[in-house]
Image: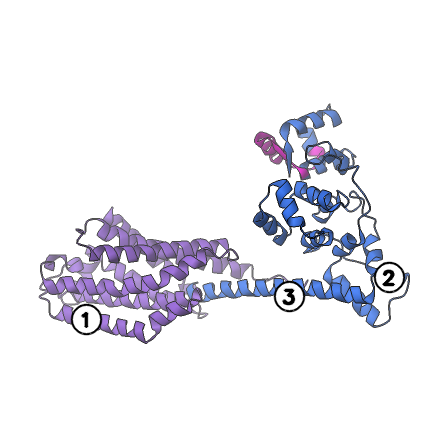
Amino acid sequence: MAVTAKAFQLWRSRIAPEDTVTDLCRVAGIKRSTLAQQLVRGKVSAPTIVAIARAYDLPPAEALAEFEGYAGLAAGIRMPTDAELVSQVSHIDILRLLVARSEDKECAGADLQLDLAPFPHRNSVRAWIEAIDPGDIRQQVAASTGVARQNLSAQLTAGRLAPEIAVEAARIAGVSLTSGLVVTGLLTPHEGGWPEDGRARALCAMSDLDLVFLARDRLDVLGKQIRRAELDDGKDRAMWENLG
Amino acid sequence: MTTTIQWAAFGLCAAGAAVRVPGLREGRGRTMFMALVLLTLAVGLSLDPIYLAVDAVLGGGNVANLLLRLALYAVFLLFGIRMAAAFDAARARRLIVGPFGLSIVALTVAATLYFFVSSELGGSSTGLRAFDDQDTVRQYGAVGRLYPGYVAACLVVPAALAVFDRHARPIHRFACALVACGYALVVVFVLLRLTPLPPTSWDILLPFSAILLTVLGLCLIWVSRVTARKASNSPNKLA
């Protein structure tokens, strides 16, 4: 989430000693009022750091690593696991591969032309947490970050995860520290050390059985979401039609 | 203070009814419109100038007060039906439109008519305040509070539960909170009048605050409906 304004000022005077805050905002394309407000509150957000780092041609992961809570971030970049890669494929793409295999249209090499939709997808964050979960990751993350379990679940349901929690989750699970920042969209896959065709390769390496169960699990999640959404729609309609 | 809140309630009810006029042609919100018109009428008849003018037309025998009572019963019945449906509260619905609820309506109307006829009501008087010394007039007033209190008690719990629905829209939760507070005030008012406490300014403040809160809640739901219609393109749930 946020780094202290003091640490930010130190960092800024190192990377751009000549530039004022106004210059910084202009170069990085962030609103001056946004940064000013963050400085007044004493907390500068991670997206601001990333935007400034990009503008000054610094690797964002290295820039973040200078701040408390992100220590060792750049050094902790590793190859994402296959489970992580597959978790970032949308259910539509999984079903497309399933259909392609059922029609014998998949042949070695052709797979890499799957044209996977860019990620993060709608359920990226939750799917990633499930992919790296050794069994009790939510309890462990809650315990080590001090964030309540309920709050954590709410973030996952909304498809969000605060950056320092994402890093902590990766640390606990023993995966690449930038993975969580990639799946929340803070870093691009390239910045986070995710290979470009990694997802397609990991997906195509799955056996038919694993692919079918993966599709089943994803459809299960989707079904629950749609049921929830329709229930909420029904309640809204009841409210409008009876009292509106 | 008391007159201000009465006029404010009158204005808000009239506004709540007026904004629903354009939807009527498409058949939307007819019941709520009817209920709000009746509520505007009832609130208007509790204001001196309007009451005296209307009662003069009706012959000066305080028939306007009877009209007020019957309009209020209709308002609570209509609100009760619609809100029980909106909150998906099957038990509240049974209690209001089931055999028990309807027999309470019938009993209340019969008792109201009986006490009205058996009172000596010569000369217009808003709220029948000039005849407070008659026992039948006091009974008439007590019966008039019975049914609204009953419906409000049925709806307080479902409305309050809707406030705690974490999946609901914030505007709906806020509107439900207003409605729940309104009904809670009605219940408190009815209970307080059963005690020997002398009816001072709270006798006006409580019921009219309840009307303000409830109608404000209904207006918020109307706003939510109108804004939702403008942004009617629902997202593709499968994508």
The location of residue A208, given as percent across then percent down, is 82, 67
From this view, report whether residue B65 is shown above or below residue A85: below
- Marks 1 and 3 sit apart, C-alpha to C-alpha, by 55 Å
- Which one is in front, B41 or A47? A47
User: Mark 3 packing: few (<14 Cα in 10 Å), some, or many (20+)?
Assistant: some
Q: What's the residue type where badge 3 is placed?
A: Gly
Against A195, residue B224 (above or below) is: below
Q: Which residues are magenta?
A: A26-46
What residue is shown with label 1?
B111
| Chain A display color | blue
User: Is residue A161 at all visible to an observer of this figure?
Assistant: no
The answer to which image quadrant residue A40 occupies is: top right
Seen at 79% across and 64% down, the residue is A210
Q: Residue at x 32, y 61 (%)?
A: B152
The vertical placement of A57 against B149, above or below, is above
In front of the other: A103 or B222: A103
State which chain is coloured purple: B
Q: Which mark is residue A236?
A: none
The crowding category of the residue bearing disc 2, from other C-alpha atoms within 10 Å (few below 14, some 14 to 19, many at least 20), is some
Q: Residues within 10 Å of mark 1 (few under 14, many from 20)?
A: some
Query: What chain letter is assigned to the residue under label 1?
Result: B
Sequence-wise, the earlier of marks 3 and 2 is 2
Provide the secondary structure element on which disc 2 rests: helix
Q: What percent of the width, then of the height, locates residue A55?
A: 75, 35
In front of the other: A143 or A87: A143
Label 1 element class? helix
User: Main SS type for the magenta part?
Assistant: helix
Question: Looking at numbered disc 2 in the image, what kind of residue is underneath it?
Answer: Asp
Name the mark on residue A111.
2
